[in-house]
Image: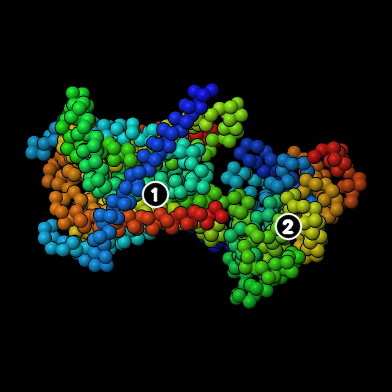
Amino acid sequence: MRWSVKGMKVFYAVLIFFTFTSLIIIAGIAVSLITVSSPIFMKYGLDFVLKSVWNPVTEDYGILPALLGTLMTSTIAILIATPLAISLAVFSSEIIPQRFRSFMNSISDLMASLPSVIYGLWGLYVLAPILHNYIMLPLHNYLGFIPLFSTKPTPTNLFTAGVLLAIMIVPFASSIVREAYAAAPYNLKEAAYSIGMTKWEVTKITLGYIKSAIFAGLFLALGRAMGETVAVAMVVGNVPNIPKSLFDVGYTISSLIANQFPNAQAYEYMVPALYGGATLLFLVGLIMNLVGLYFVRKVMIKS
Amino acid sequence: MNKRKLKDKIMLGVISLLAIISAIPILMIIINIYAEGLKYVNLSFLINFPPPPIGGKVGGIGPALVGSLILMSLALVIGGCIGFFTGLYLSEFSHTRLAQYAQLFLQIMVEFPTIIIGLFAYSILVAPLKRFNAFAGAFALSIVIIPYIALNVREAYKSIPHSLKEAAFSLGISHSKVYLKVLLSTARRGVLTALLIGMAKAAGETAPLLFTILGATFLYFEGLDQPINAIPLLIYNFASSPYERWHQVAWGASAVLLSIILAIFIISRLVIKEVRM
Amino acid sequence: MSWAIEINNLNVWYSDKHILKDISFKVPKNIIFAIMGPSGCGKSTLLRAMNRLLELNPNAKVKGQVKINGIDVYNDNVDITWVRRQFGMVFQIPNPFPHLSVYDNVALGPKLNGLVKNKKQLDELVKHALQQAYLWDEVKNDLKKPASMLSGGQQQRLCIARALALKPKIILMDEPTANLDPVASSKIEELMLELKENYTIIIVTHNSQQAARISDYVAFLYMGKLVEVGETSTVFTKPRHELTEKYVVGKIG
């Protein structure tokens, strides 16, 4: 009799142990980032974030170009992905016939689960040449006087990275919108149709109703775009300079880490500098996620 | 009235067009990968060593395939264990502070850049040992999949109707048997899906492996404390290299990786379909 | 006289809400004891306090005693699984494990509790439990079919068989006929009358006619308080309390 009471306690202790382990790992990540990166912040302070220099010989590191690259690629991605993701969600829940719906959703879910290295390979050898020949070159040739298109493009650059990121985050963002769309109350639609609204007008109403979910999806997708590493590293060009136009080659924080880390051990401050970049990424990602989760919770409370 | 109908038609048309555009890449990716990659894939491709950068035959991805399988299994054991029990705790003790914090942190971690996890594994398992090693890679992959597994296991247990939970507890069996036998069999599809999602992640992640296993291209598995290679890492390294020969291997390896992911994806769809029956 | 169950000064709270207030009564062996009252009066809570199923709700707090064979089930040294094995429980919504077969639904409890040594014993136990629940003849050819294929009434009798297979001393029934049609309900009631030969049955019902029809003793619960308890014939014909009278003639409900 007593033994069994003990057995139960052991079982719960196991559960709590593993849950603690998960928490400790997460805490460990934060602690290791901060401790390893602290020398660089001690040495340069805010300059580390605001300077554009990457000189291992003089051990001078500033991460501004990579930070701008991250912001630029993810902005391009989210601008392209937003209309696509919402359209995809509306299309699969409102427009195509019921029996194709689950197929359509499967396609979108499959896209979300493809490894990023596959996107990277495809982006490098298929997407980059297409964008280069049919979009970037014509834009540069005819509209090159606009600063955005002023750089003569190479196939791999910030714009290619942004488009590839857009392709990668569309299915993820759209699945969040799709779930919210399905959860919108049926009587809302009924009411809208009953006063003679057209399908588009009803869709607009429904989208307005689930706008928190749309924000949630977009913020979480933005977080993903900022943190994506290998696919971007394969198509962004990997040059640490301040981007002068959309078509400039550049770096993102994560691709900088991926590229520079293997030879960073040879220098005193490069490891801390790269961990410093990761810390920034961590903070920005944290904010994106918290905002995203805030909107998710708002949706859940509503429904 | 006519103007409204026209607007309706146009907007729905635009939406459909955008939706179709966003579905084009996936089809292109699958077609391109198989068209370019399948021609190199055969049995010896799965077994042989990769070729030298210049000259020679295409060779194979043997070491990377073995490495990937080892890393996946280890990650699934470690991450599966921690993730499963954490998920069970999140579901059944959702009222506790610990569960609430753990859930929030895991939700954030799901979206975390995996390269950060690679750095973490580097600093606690590679730097102290002064050697890239397979275990560090498996550890990093475990951390990547813990939140996926935990949150999906939580969903699976949460979805069990309360009346069935009461029935299980009224049987007078120990709580571990209630959760791990009776209720696990009720939630088995959800739990299985969770593990499949974890497996697909572990199979495809590259960033956590960059600084942990080194990508020992020409070595078969020699022990957990030694460097190895994995398919995603091989694709990344070879595709970014300047050598045509290695690009071909990268395409072939991508066809293999895509097939692994597709297989896991289709199995998980079948599992879910059975639920809806 | 030895009692099947004794309840002394039982109080239950959900968070800050006082659900059961100072409940005390005793239940004799081998009878049907009905707990009746309007919905929300705490009947189901009282039932779940007996086998400590209440603890599934983390907000529930219990004070007081529930004794079986002189042992307080809330004593720290008492094993909760032992407590639950003393009771078989049948619920308001028939809740067989839908993915398990008819056979496995009944066999699961004895198997996991180690009540049987081999397959043959298990087969016999399952058959006996199904016979006791009046279900054997209807399902003996479908033992391997999933339980979800059975009708509502059959599912409920399967749940009774599942409870009986654990060889409990007391059977708790939480409005077992509330979701069944009249024919299936009367079958369950018949079954209960049969079962009281060997078991003590405690049934919760919001239907005073059902309580009058089948119970030997009845307790009337109102807003968390025990208003009246006694032999069914007395309570229904000569209620001591005005509230009870109102309830049995259908003025509260």
- Circle nearer the viewer, 2 or 1: 1
Give amino acid for label 2. Answer: Gly
In the rendered view, tell whether residue B271 sits above or below residue B106.
below
Q: Residue at x 85, y 37 (%)?
A: C251
Within-10-Å neighbours for mark 1: few <14, some 14–19, many 20+ = some
Q: Residue B9, percent across and down?
A: 47, 31
Q: Residue A36, percent across and down?
A: 23, 41
- Using the image as rendered, state which of residue A134 and residue A285 is in the foreground: A134
In the rendered view, tell whether residue B56 sits above or below residue A256.
below
In the rendered view, tell whether residue C25 sits above or below residue B100.
below
Q: Secondary structure at mark 2?
A: helix
Q: Chain of mark 2?
A: C
- Which residue matches tag 2? C153
Judge from the rendering whether residue C55 lies leftward or rightward of residue C22; answer left or right.
left
- Using the image as rendered, state which of residue B140 and residue A41 is in the foreground: B140
Q: Residue furthest right?
A: C237
How far apart are labels 2 and 1 at the CA level? 44 Å
Judge from the rendering whether residue B104 lies leftward or rightward of residue C21; answer left or right.
left
Q: Secondary structure at mark 1?
A: helix
- Using the image as rendered, state which of residue B109 and residue B42 is in the foreground: B42
Quarter of the image with the N terminus of chain C in it: bottom right
Q: Residue B238, percent across and down?
A: 19, 53
Within-10-Å neighbours for mark 2: few <14, some 14–19, many 20+ = many
Give amino acid for label 1. Answer: Leu
- Which residue matches tag 1? A110
Q: Residue A159, percent across and down?
A: 24, 35
Q: Residue at x 38, y 33 (%)?
A: A82
> In which quadrant of the rendered view does residue A136 lie?
top left
Q: Chain of mark 1?
A: A
Q: Is residue C57 in view from this perspective?
A: yes
